[in-house]
Amino acid sequence: MTLVIGPDDPADPEWAEAASLPEVSALVRAGRTVLVTLPEDETEAIAAAAAYAWAGAGVFRTSRSVTYDPAASHPGTSHLVRQALDMTEALLGRRPPALTRRGLA
């Protein structure tokens, strides 16, 4: 399970903060719950979230609030990060895909 938190949300003292993929991998192997802070740029945040999730990080701090407004013309960074995390977890087999299709041409 992954958790997305905002910049002002408190971090659990049990979480270990990491700043690189090797550090994430080492902490995950040690059995720790890993917190990573994502870049402010939206595209970089989405890519970093997917890579860190693949390495085993479980908590992701975004640079913006984690509230999602479905009426907004563009989903917020946290919503896009959540989509990337859900996709990564589905690829890793940790959760079922949001939508399955079978191509029968």
Image (cartoon, helix red, strand yellow):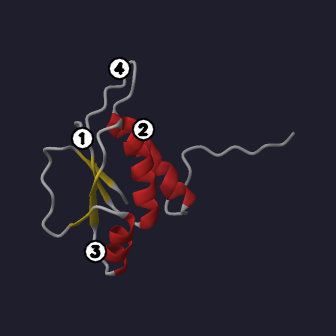
**Please, which residue is most extreme toward the right here?**
105
Q: From mark 3 to mark 2, how far is it between C-alphas?
A: 27 Å
- Of pointers 1 and 3, the one earlier in the residue sequence: 3
Where in the figure is residue 91, as x and y percent of width and height? 56, 57
Residue corresponding to mark 4: 72
- Of pointers 2 and 1, the one earlier in the residue sequence: 2
Q: Please tell me in which quadrant of the rendered image residue 6 appears.
A: top left
- Marks 4, 1: nearer the viewer: 1
Q: From mark 4 to mark 3, how far is it between C-alphas?
A: 36 Å
- Marks 2, 4: nearer the viewer: 2
Query: At 34% across and 36% down in the image, what residue appears?
Result: 77
**Please, which residue is most extreme toward the bottom here?**
30
Residue corresponding to mark 1: 63
Query: Looking at the image, do the residues carrying marks 4 and 3 touch, with CB atoms under 8 Å apart?
Result: no
Q: From mark 2 to mark 1, how far is it between C-alphas?
A: 13 Å
Helix, strand or loop at disc 3?
loop
Residue corresponding to mark 3: 32
Query: At 35% across and 76% down in the image, what residue appears?
Result: 26
